[in-house]
Image: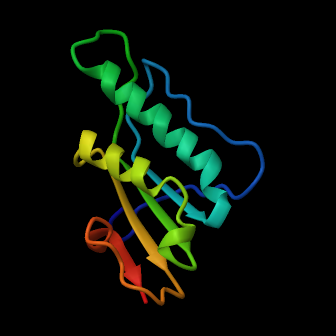
Amino acid sequence: CTLDSEVALRVGGDFFFDPQPGDSPVNLVLIAGGVGINPLFSILLHIADLHGYQEGKGNRPKLGTAKLYYSAKNTSQLLFKKNILGLMKAFPGKITCCFHVTQQRSQICKELQPHITGK
């Protein structure tokens, strides 16, 4: 988003991301805390599948980017972090993530360091 961008937020409840071939591409910003990552991780996997199928295929939805902001007390409580890093490597610039930790006491592994904010 840029300054003055219009965004839509949805908190809680049943939600999904199911773009159709005729839809305009959208950029997603996904925000999760703790175990709230579960449904959003499913959405990320769906986006990755669609990006994978997009290569050279005709009647597929057009996709924008997906940015995940994910917060937990420390890196050990960041569920699916290795999977999320793998998605970022597989789809650079299309799927990105920023992890935020609030009470990290130990050293953060080098693989996560570029993607960590907070203490």
Residue at 70% across / 58% down in the picture? Answer: 11
User: On screen, 119 above or below 14?
Assistant: below
Residue at 32% across / 72% down in the picture? Answer: 109
User: On screen, 84 above or below 61?
Assistant: below
Q: Please identify the quarter of the rendering in which residue 67 is found.
A: bottom left
Whether residue 119 can be seen here? yes
Which residue is at the front of the view, 41 or 82?
82
Q: Please identify the quarter of the rendering in which residue 55 is found.
A: top left
Please state if 100 lies on the left or on the right of 92 as rendered. right
Please state if 42 lies on the left or on the right of 28 as rendered. right
Residue at 39% across / 34% down in the picture? Answer: 48
Quadrant where the C terminus lies? bottom left
In the rendered image, residue 92, in percent from the top left (x then y), is placed at 22, 46
Please state if 67 lies on the left or on the right of 79 as rendered. left
Which residue is at the front of the view, 106 or 14?
106
Residue at 41% across / 41% down in the picture? Answer: 26
In the rendered image, residue 19, in percent from the top left (x then y), is placed at 50, 28
Q: Please identify the quarter of the rendering in which residue 59 is found.
A: top left
In the rendered image, residue 75, in percent from the top left (x then y), is placed at 48, 72
Whether residue 24 can be seen here? no
Which residue is at the front of the view, 106 or 30?
106
Please state if 60 lies on the left or on the right of 89 as rendered. right
Quadrant where the N terminus lies? bottom left
